[in-house]
Amino acid sequence: MKTLKRSLPGRKLLLTGVLAALALTKPAAAEERAKDLFGARKLPAVATPQSFGFYSKGCFAGGVAIPMDGMHWEVMRPSRNRRWGHPAMIALIEKLSRDAAADGWPGLLIGDISQPRGGPMLTGHASHQIGLDADIWLTPMPDRKFSTEERENISATLMVDEKTHLVKDGLWMPMHTRLLKRAASYPEIERILVNPGIKKKLCDTVTGDRSWLRKMRPFWGHDYHFHMRIGCQPGSPDCKPQADTTPGDGCDKSLAWWFTEEPWRPNKNPDAPKARDLMTMANLPRQCQFVLDAPDPASAEAVTYHGDGVPVAAADPPLQPASAPAPTITSGATALPASVNAFAPTPKIGIPLPRPRPGN
Ligand SMILES: [Zn+2]
């Protein structure tokens, strides 16, 4: 013991020296991949809710978690810790779960939303970085709670035949259509990504009001879940909106393209690094460094949104002066401030060019 005590001051000095050396290597640390830095954060940035940057290049502060279970939802793949989002997103998922249940969909199985502070993910998605994207399975919730192990391992139902790119016979039910229609009915939802086969199924079968098909956007993957995206929220002046969807139901040439060979050609450069593998903090909006450095809340529970009138994160200080007041959460059904429907029609753009095939 004596020896140890005597040697402590020396060790302290040594440690200080090591720390100083580490500090000198800061420029190297700045080259750290953003996905490693954001992927390591277990809790959100305590701040007024605010999104920075774009869906595929950004981060967000003031995130809240959706509880693991609700009356009409269960969170899947909990180990990924991606049940975080902008409060408006979380409130909307909870609202969808109630409305969908009233429509006859037993409940939502919730896939990835965002990491606690958003940012690029260690695996998977290019988007989901600013708390405004959420994946919902096309498999209805069973009438029991899944165990943690089941949530990690149970497979979703693949709805689409990989060869024909058409929805498999017998799998699509009217309640799937009703669920998507309900989600698309919310003004906050700007677009919903589905597999081209699912888009085609809707095009071929939806009668009556077809206006909501405009929001249903065909995209690779999305054959066991749909991906819903809300617009930039009030209080996020540095959130970059996406281009509007084009007018019309999209059941046209742009859909027909998906049933040609072109979109499915093998990737010419499969080993090219993905954006998330290259992104450093320098590639993200500068505020993302503050988001990364902001303090943790006391616990995940302290920032879990229960839609029960408990104000979450509302009293937190702004990360930086926001140009508009942050939304205040009041109660479940009325959680979204009236101004949240502020998705003014964005300017018309030309015929959408199909996006290049993603690397994975
Ligand atoms: Zn998604």
Image (tube, grey):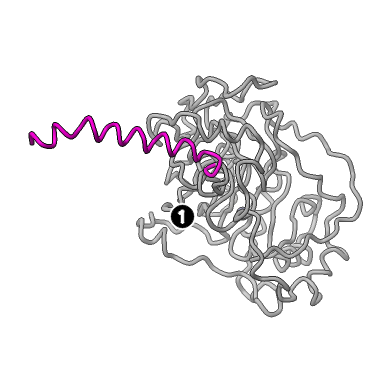
Q: Which residue is drawn at 85% across and 63% down?
A: 254
Dominant SS in magenta: helix
57 relative position to 301: left or right: right
State the quadrant of the N terminus. Answer: top left
Q: Please state the quadrant of the image where ligand 1 appears.
A: bottom right
- Say whether mark 1 is within 8 Å of ligand 1: no
Placement of 208 over or under 312, stated as above or below: below
Q: Nearer the viewer, residue 8 or 100?
A: 8
Q: Which corner quadrant of the image does residue 244 belong to? A: top right
The count of marks equals: 1
Placement of 203 over or under 293, stated as above or below: below
Q: Position of residue 2 (x, y in %)?
A: 8, 34
291 relative position to 145: left or right: right
Q: Label 1, on which residue?
A: 76
Can residue 179 be seen here? Answer: no
Q: Which residue is drawn at 36% across and 60% down?
A: 149
Query: In the image as oriented, which residue stretches furthest toward the bottom?
Result: 163
289 relative position to 253: left or right: left
State the quadrant of the C terminus. Answer: bottom right
Can residue 337 be seen here? Answer: yes
Magenta residue span: 1-29
Q: Where is residue 292 in the image (x, y as percent from the top left)?
A: 52, 35
Q: Residue at x 79, y 73 (%)?
A: 259
Q: Which residue is drawn at 46% across and 29% down?
A: 295
